[in-house]
Image: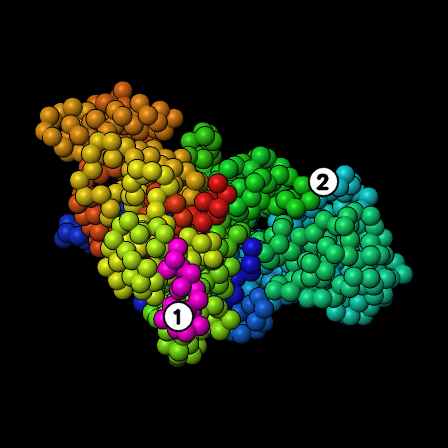
Amino acid sequence: MANSKIRIQDALDYHTKGTPGKIEVIPTKATKTQRDLALAYSPGVAEPCRKIADNVEDVYKYTARGNLVAVISNGTAVLGLGNIGPEASKPVMEGKGLLFKIFAGIDVFDLELSSTNVEEFITVVKALEPTFGGINLEDIKAPDCFEIERRLKEELNIPIMHDDQHGTAIISGAGLINALKVLDKKADEVKVVVSGAGASAISCIKIFIELGISKKNIIVCDSKGVIRNDRENLPPSKKEFATDLDFHKLEDAIVNADVFLGLSQGNVMSPDMLKQMAPDPIVFALANPDPEIPYELAMATRDDLLMATGRSDHPNQVNNVLGFPFIFRGALDVRATEINEAMKLAAVKAIANLAQKQVPEVVIKAYNKDNITFGRDYIIPKPLDPRLLTEVAPAVAKAAMDSGVAKNHITDWDEYKTSLIKRLGNDDQIIRRLTNKAKQHPKRIVFAEAEDYRVLKAAQIALDEGIAIPILLGDVEKIRALIAKHQLDLHDTKIINPHSKESADIVERYGKIFYDKRQRRGYNPYEAKNEMKKRNYFGCMMVETGEADAVISGISRKYTQTIKPALQIIGTKGPGQKVSSMYLMLTKRGPLFFTDTTMIPNPSAEELVDIAFQAATAVEQMMNIEPKVAFLAYSNFGSSDDPEPKLVRKAAALMKQNYPEIISDGEIQANFAFNQEELKEHYPFSDLVGNEPNVLVFPTLTSANIAYKLLQVMKSAEAIGPIILGMKHPVHILQVGSSVREVLNMITIATIDAQIKSSH
């Protein structure tokens, strides 16, 4: 998996296009009528005000305080940027708020304070207590951050955590537990060397001690060398971990060390130093973006090494997002008055225990692995593991209750876990999972319309992200001019012009192949060769001959101009196989799959079954989601004998007969399909009771097409598609006028499709 490459202009465009920034405030109640507004503000708002005035704890009942966290910084220690000031730190704080929301459903106000005075900072934050359910301190320089957090925890009655200190410590602590377990080493016997003595390093050391590491076995180094008791003017945070041992440099201290923890800067550890460590060494090189020793170099130096870094392109990533969203989630849900050591340790152990459990298929497939098992290369859960929310948040909540800092007690833990899943809208992070899956094994994607800026930009992003290897078709000079004009980095990408002299031999070869395929279907050799000069034909032939893995087209051409050459050259999976299409609709209910939206206008019952089976197979194989199929109609289970409901009814029966292993039912109206209470009351026999559908089979192309376009235009869902199903090799068609984002989504789908087809 390649490490993401972020370009300066892309980052600036991301933050400026549309509404500036990354977050907004959205009402959670109806606001459409005058009565709604009267209830929301005056005079209706007076009633909850009176209730809260009588009992201040009712603020959690009548307002959003219980789900609202402040992310507060003064910008004095922004990761990788240093003291850049409060305004410049705001994009980081907005980003932190975004992570809180998407991983744990927590709302955030980011607050950037123009103050470097510790007392003033504390005074301002204390005055904000009535607004927030919790406070996340961020990017505040040491040693100020220690005093600020200590005082605020003492003087406020809401959960407070400085994530720079404790986030890395919690994830590192989980990793240490499992590293010691994998290598069968005992915590109280290992020698630990730490490079770095900032806020994060100090917090890590404290967590390690809580986990059983002996303080006397820890040696801490900063930029001046080993922190010793005889060094003058040591701040209290360093003095606590100073040593009298006869070590002066990192090179001395590392000899026979069992554990190296790096929170300093890149390349401070040499291969020779690594060789001096004890057998089966544990190295947590967490400096970003460059670890204290490069991963590849370290692994080449010691074959008995267990290593973790802060990077996503190596095993065992120490990523704070594994901790802070879920820690605050648990703390808020029991209205904890603080985040104490018991809660942090509960998070450490929950994260460690999760890595020891069998990894679910959805996570394995998201990382495109045959299997992921607990061991040297997997001691920390993957960031896309959906179980983090339901494992870590309850553990933290329970620790808050057991340690006496919870005002609200949870009694039904199963119900609580269910509520956590519902809070995130069941979207299961599908796009992040698909992108990650594509990155594991990028494929060669040929773009038949590379003279379009949107295609080129999406191709560059796909290349940067490691999603795909682009092949561009079109006029070479025009494409290079677009690349130069928009400052894209595609200069090493293969560009082919089928009309050029350089491509004459390839066109000749492709023409002969095409003529062999179509000589009895109206083509002579001259016509076959000429067709190969058309980019859609050329691209499809590249895929057919194995010179590319998938083809994408359609951003500026009619649908038929892309699908016709694909059918003529590549063809379907098998004799008599029909081709259908499916849209992935990203909704608040989670992902839904609409089929058939573009291919078969008026399908027979048998064709509806084929459509449903193709879609269900794609949902399972490409999306790693269990398909649950609803055959939709304007009637329910025989309530109408009109021709169309009867056709759908027959299809549903054939589906059960031919594919009993797939959950399916129909004919059924859409409102009943998505209302479990009504469905259970009126049609308790339905296989969709307890199985809310995600694959929707429409009776006609017209109904499917209208449905997805209505949801799209009403901003009720983001549409990805059409995803073409039933082809022998991957061919995917863009909507005319697709955005860069939509092209990139289709590249991701095409890569995954190619991964699946190449493995069969």
| The N terminus, quarter of image | bottom right
Magenta stretch: includes residue 503: yes
Left or right side of 700 for 362: right
Residue 85 shows which numbered tag?
A: none
Q: Which residues are magenta?
A: 497-513
Percent coordinates x, y for residue 493 in the rendering: 48, 68
> Disc 2 marks which residue?
182
Is 654 on the left or on the right of 391, as rendered? left
Give amino acid for label 1. Asn
Disc 2 residue type? Answer: Val
* Vertical order, 312 against 83 (above or below): above
The colour mode here is: rainbow
Q: Is residue 527 visible?
A: yes
Which residue is found at the position 18% from the left and 48% from the top?
Answer: 706
Rendered position, 491 above or below 281 = below
Distance of label 1 from label 2 (alpha carbons): 54 Å
Ranked by sequence position, the earlier of labels 1 and 2 is 2
> Badge 1, how many Cα within 10 Å: few under 14, some, many 20+?
many
Marker disc for residue 497: 1
Question: Vertically, is 87 above or below 109?
Answer: below
Q: Residue 140 or 464: which is nearer the viewer?
A: 464
Q: Element type at marker 1?
A: loop
- Residue reaching furthest to the left: 642
Q: Local crowd at mark 2 within 10 Å, few (<14), some, or many (≥20)?
A: some
Residue at figure coordinates x 31%, y 52% from the top left: 519
For mark 2, give the secondary structure: helix
